[in-house]
Amino acid sequence: MRALVIVAVNVFREAVRDRVLYILVAFAVLLISVSFLLGQLTAGQDVKIIKDLGLAAIATFGLLIAVFIGIGLVWKEVERKSIYSLLSKPIRRYEFILGKYAGLALTLFVNVAVMTLAFYAVLAFLNTRFPAPMRAAWPAPATDPGMLLAIALIFVELLLVTAIALFFSTFSGPFLSAALTLGLWVIGSFNADLRNFEAVLQSPAAGWIARGLYYVLPNFAAFDVKAQVVHALPVPPAYVLTTAVYGVVYIALLLTASVLVFDRRDFK
Amino acid sequence: MSGRRWLFVLLALLGGGVIGLQAVHDRAGGPPAAQTPAMLYVRSPEAMKRLALSYDQLLADVYWIRTVQHYGGTKLSNDPDKRYDLLFPLLDLTTSLDPRMTVAYLFGAVFLAEPHPGGPGRPDQAIRLLEKGLDTQPENWRFAQAIGFVHYWWLMDYPTAADWFTRAAALPDAPSWLTPLAAVTLAQGGRRDSSRRLWEEFARTAEEDWFRNEAQRRLMQLDAMDQIDFLTAELRRGRALPGTPVDPTGVPYRIDGGTVSLDPRSRLSPLPTGPYTLQ
């Protein structure tokens, strides 16, 4: 367990050294500058657009970190040959994999948390620029805490993407891993269409395959409740809980598969 | 001077050069004008919704900004043949990507119904857009009220307008003034005082500044119509007008022989046409 924590802390330190946290500055600059420009471009939709942009930016920046750091987690150690000295130390292979994953999860958590704080700060500032009658007409307050539900699901989605990237990283190079992870994310976003595919397909077999894929591939569309929170529509707690549990179980599956693959690799 | 200092000097010189050349380019008026038609590469809302992945909300915002820019840019352009061809497809895409973007339906309907050159003059498309909004939010009284308004103001179909106001009044949270408005519309549709009442209620209850300003502009148009009728009557009676009469925005009226009209440069121009009688 101690070894796992050491690996995780090192992944986080390495991310900080690699200036990953600079993404936070980019996020803050993007949001603040857009909030000043929007008033000139839109017809009274500033707060709604900042909410959409903020949530999309948290998801996108998080996705970039999850994919592009996730794919290098194992591959870098193999490429640098540091894996040989690492595994000669009293550290089990599963601890190495889980430690790498926990380190990147910690990096993502810090990023998402700071981006969320900046997001709410910009919204609180925007809130002061509108008179009370106009604010009363909004479907939800500018700093609606309900948006945290969407951010929580985005975080679980990012953890799932990280697990996919780590899984591919255990047996393939960075380019293939990035392509496979991003490809799976795109297919996973179309997941609902796979379910309805059999209605437009002639062949029943192809329909079953599509339905099978619907159940097997990660359903990233399920984690997207951005529209609901921006329009203050109800998101049942049971839905959030079920989706979070789905994400956690899928992550556990991928981490188990990663440990299995990594365990079979020959580093002697 | 050390090599590094030279590099800094070179950097400053090149930076200055880039800014200077940009200024020269700017003074020359930029690239030669090219008449390029406005394009919308993807018009299918279904295709766009799929292409958007999980960014449909953000894409809806982008299309909304593009809609406002397209409408405003065309309206303010010097082109005599102002074309709003992309307006409805843009609004259709925006509202398909974010079906709960209420403002896009309400503003969009105003943009679409406005007659040329202030808009494309398509009340039919305005009604289609509002009916789409009503499909996604069947309990939103504003859509039913707006449909009634398009029938009232642009199509001058007062029985249908009254019917829509009645339907709007029956929806949850509808304001109490909609029921008497429906009755007045049915009984006195087309009269200036009932139109004034309609716009006064819109100005009083509008949630967006843009709508409030638009309602106030329409009220000023009705005032201008009253003033033109009065001034024309005075001229016909052979009475001299005191000074140069101005419209409610302060722009002088055009007096040509026995007729008084609005200056086309006034922001109240063009005045609505139709059977808007004084009594």
Image (spheres, coloured by chain):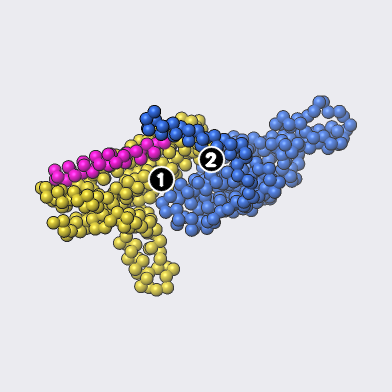
Residue at the spot 43% in from the left edge and 50% down from the top edge = B55
Q: Is residue A14 magenta?
A: yes
Q: Are marks 2 and 1 on the same chain?
A: yes
Specify which label sits upstream in the sequence, 2 or 1.
Answer: 2
Q: Residue furthest right?
A: B238
The location of residue A243, given as percent across then percent down, is: 31, 52
Asked whether the residues under the numbered discs 2 and 1 touch, taking CB atoms below 8 Å apart as contact, a structural biologist would say: no
Of the pair B75 and A30, the residue shown nearer to us: A30
Give the chain of mark 1: A
Query: Pointer 2: what residue?
Result: A42
Q: Is residue A248 visible?
A: no
Residue at the spot 39% in from the left edge and 48% down from the top edge = A225
The location of residue B156, given as percent across then percent down, is: 70, 48
Q: Label 1 sits on what residue type?
A: Ala
Query: Pointer 1: what residue?
Result: A56
> How crowded is the residue under tag 1: few (<14 C-alpha within 10 Å), some, or many (20+)?
many
Dividing the image into 4 quarters, which one contains the C terminus of chain B? top right
Provide the major secondary structure of the magenta segment. Answer: helix
